[in-house]
Image (cartoon, rainbow, N blue to C red):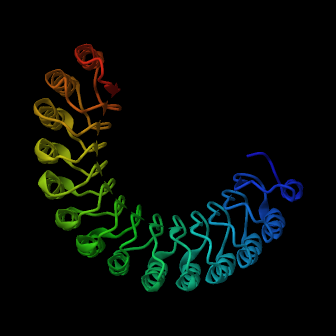
Amino acid sequence: ANGIGAAGVAALCEALESNNSLEMLSLASNNLCDEGAAVLAEYLKKDTTINTLNLNSSGIGDEGAAALAEMLKVNTTLTALELNNNSIDYEGTVALAEALAENSTLETFSISGNYVGGLGCKALANGLEKNAGIKGLQLNGNDIGDLGVAALCGALSKRETKLTNLDIGNNGFGFESGSHIAEYVATDESLTHLNLYMNELCDLGAIEIAKALKDNGGIETLDIGGNNILAAGAEALAVALKENKPMRVLELGYNPVGPKGCQALAEAVKFHSKLTTLRMGWCKVTKDGAWYLADAIKYNENLTTLDLRGNELGDEGCAALAQSLSTVNENLTSLDLGYNEIKDKGAFALAQAIKNNAEGAIASISVNNNYITKFGEVALTEAVELVEEMNPDRDLYVQF
């Protein structure tokens, strides 16, 4: 942030008149407001070098969005536009949607953290259906609801140009949207990243999406955390993981799947899934679920990152995981056990596992915000020092 307003933008645009090499322009976190956005938009109508424009958190409202929309109708250089965390409401969204219907060169469009709403998303969907360029769409935190999801997914399914990245997290939609998302996912083999974080899909929505994931050949990263998914939804996702080939990263945090849901996921990870990263923070795994995951780690050949924060694992759950790390671990490099009510007994088990497997792959263990005293910390620290002394090439870090 540099305190740049409309006058500053005008001066900048004047300087840019003689510049023929600048490709990326960021004015994020400045007080451009609508007036500054309009000045910049006028200049960009004739610019031929800038391909990336970041106007995040710039106080832009509907009038500024409308000015930028007019620019998009004639500009053929911009490929990425970020308008996150502004004050763009329905009218501004409609103007941008109409511009997208005409623009064919913009590839990434980010409008997260605005006031698009369900009706605005419906207008945006209409524009996107006619658009031939957009491959990355960020709509996080716009309260589009089920109405917006239905319209958006319907439009995206009809497009010839498929998305590779879609973020519709934090948008207040429920399980009704599950079927619409599933229908869209089934049609887009190009989609590699899908963010559905912090909505209310619940088990019903998760089950619908899981069915589509079985046959989807594109999605590599799925964030479905914070959707109130219980054991039934987790079991459906586990079945999908057994058949899904491309998925590498799964974020399930803040879903109370419990030990039963954890068991199903662990069975999928054990032999079938190609996941490299599994995040299950605050999923009510408990010590019972930890045993299932510990067993899966022994056999899995792909998982490198496992996040189990806030799961009430206690010493017993920690010891179960430590046992697996102690015997065989050629793949897991990062394990997060923060916020798990682990005491010194669990720390001692981890320390022994580190000593027993000096050639193991683990490089980072986090045990922060537990109940480990100085005794447990010393045991872990000494274990790390011993391993590094035995294997100078190994870099192992324990975070307290």
> Is 83 on the left or on the right of 167, as rendered?
right
Q: Is residue 39 above or below residue 131?
A: above
Q: Position of residue 19 (x, y in %)?
A: 82, 55
- Residue depicted at 79% across the width and 68% down the height: 41
Q: Is 366 in front, or is 166?
A: 166
> Is 159 on the left or on the right of 373, as rendered?
right
- Residue depicted at 22% across the width and 48% down the height: 302
Q: Position of residue 59 (x, y in %)?
A: 73, 60
> Is 64 on the left or on the right of 387, as rendered?
right
Residue 42 found in image quarter: bottom right
Q: Is residue 104 above or below residue 55?
A: below
Q: Is 199 in front, or is 364?
A: 364
Residue 389 found in image quarter: top left
Q: Is 153 in front, or is 234?
A: 153
> Is 144 on the left or on the right of 97, as rendered?
left
Q: Position of residue 215 (x, y in %)?
A: 24, 73
Q: Position of residue 393 (x, y in %)?
A: 30, 21
- Residue depicted at 38% across the width and 74% down the height: 174
Q: Quadrant of the C terminus?
A: top left
